[in-house]
Amino acid sequence: MRYTTFGRRSGLRVSEYALGTGNFGTGWGAGTERDEAKAIFDRFVEAGGNFIDTADTYQAGQSEQLVGEFVRAERDDLVLATKFTVGASPQPKLLRTGNARKNLRISVEESLSRLGTDYIDVLWVHYPDALTPVDEILRGLDDLVHQGKILYIGLSNFPAWRVSRAALLAEVSGWSPIVGIQIEYSLVERSADRELLPMAEALGLGATFWSPLGGGLLTGKYRHGREGRLSDWNRLVHSESTAQTTAIVDAVLEVAQEIGCPPAQVATAWVSERARRLATPALPIVGPRHVAQLDDYLAALDVELTDAQYDRLTDVSAIDLGIPHVANARSLDGLQGGTAAAFEAPRVPVV
């Protein structure tokens, strides 16, 4: 496992994978029992992984409880991230959802209790609630940083304009900075290429990519059955609903056959390579339900796509960036004498 800093706004060193623990527990009616979850955690740490990602809402709080138990012996050697907004209760009361300061304070205290720790390395605001002013969110988070209860701040599933406004407000107000974003990203979900990833590169924000396998679609397994997230949750799953999606799955299967490895490893290797080519550090969040699935993810670290294979997958999955990106690209392409290189952001090395 290699390591990099979490964006250019922090010195936090993280592994090239984060372990997503949304499957830890059975509070949603489907998930991973404790012993298997512990085996997944141990295998990830043994492989050199140090970034653990959970949320108060995952498995109705069970994920945080299990993660807290597992990290206890190595707490200070691991980067522990969790989220608030939705709440752990399946039927939360009015004031126990959203991003208002009251719910923020209560949610963090309860997460600390479930996690069995006195600080959280990265606290993600899980979703924008369209109600709470961004300065209230930032001021509340800054207070928690000063209290030592959280160390870093990130925004999950926020649109680019909200993130950029928050980053600027934090900077000019002297509040704790936004250091990262968490977004869905895979060969079948590349909407972040329009605004979110260019913004992250420009502002130096770290990025974590959830669902790098498109909810399992990129494994090819749904061409033969429904077992998996599709049958258990029937949400956060992509389907072959368009000609492009079918072409993407076809390309993944073809490259897998050429390399001689499972399609899941090809899809993950592409996301990892895409992350390495960004001007700011980014990494996939892998969320296995079983140790065998984690082993598949870990094996993908050794998969090397040729430039031709990487380009084939990139091209078949490309989205229409729309205006103003298309017009801007044409203008930059017209620059002569290598001037276009001046528009490239500095890159952070992976060690």
Image: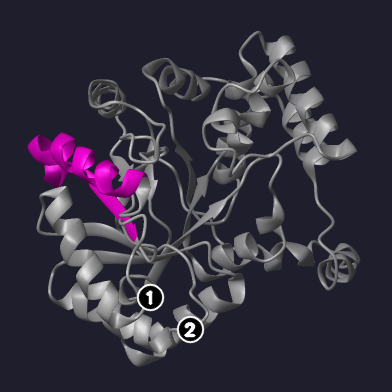
73 in magenta: yes
Given contact means CB atoms under 8 Å apart, are the residues at marks 1 and 2 in contact?
A: yes
User: Helix, strand, or loop for circle 2?
Assistant: loop
Residue bearing mark 2: 131
- Lateral position of residue 125 relative to residue 329, left or right: left
User: Label 2 sits on what residue type?
Assistant: Leu
Question: Is 33 above or below relative to 245?
Answer: above
Question: How far from the left and from the top, in percent, is residue 223?
Answer: 74, 20
Q: How many marks?
A: 2
- Lateral position of residue 158 relative to residue 26, left or right: right
User: Label 1 sits on what residue type?
Assistant: Asn
Question: Is 327 above or below relative to 265?
Answer: below
User: Helix, strand, or loop for circle 1?
Assistant: loop
First in sequence: mark 1 vs mark 2: 1
Q: Which colour scheme is used?
A: one colour
Q: Give the range drawn in magenta.
A: 59-83
Q: Does the rendering let one see residue 150?
A: no
Badge 1 crowding class, 10 Å Cα cut-off, few under 14, some 14 to 19, many 20 or more, is many
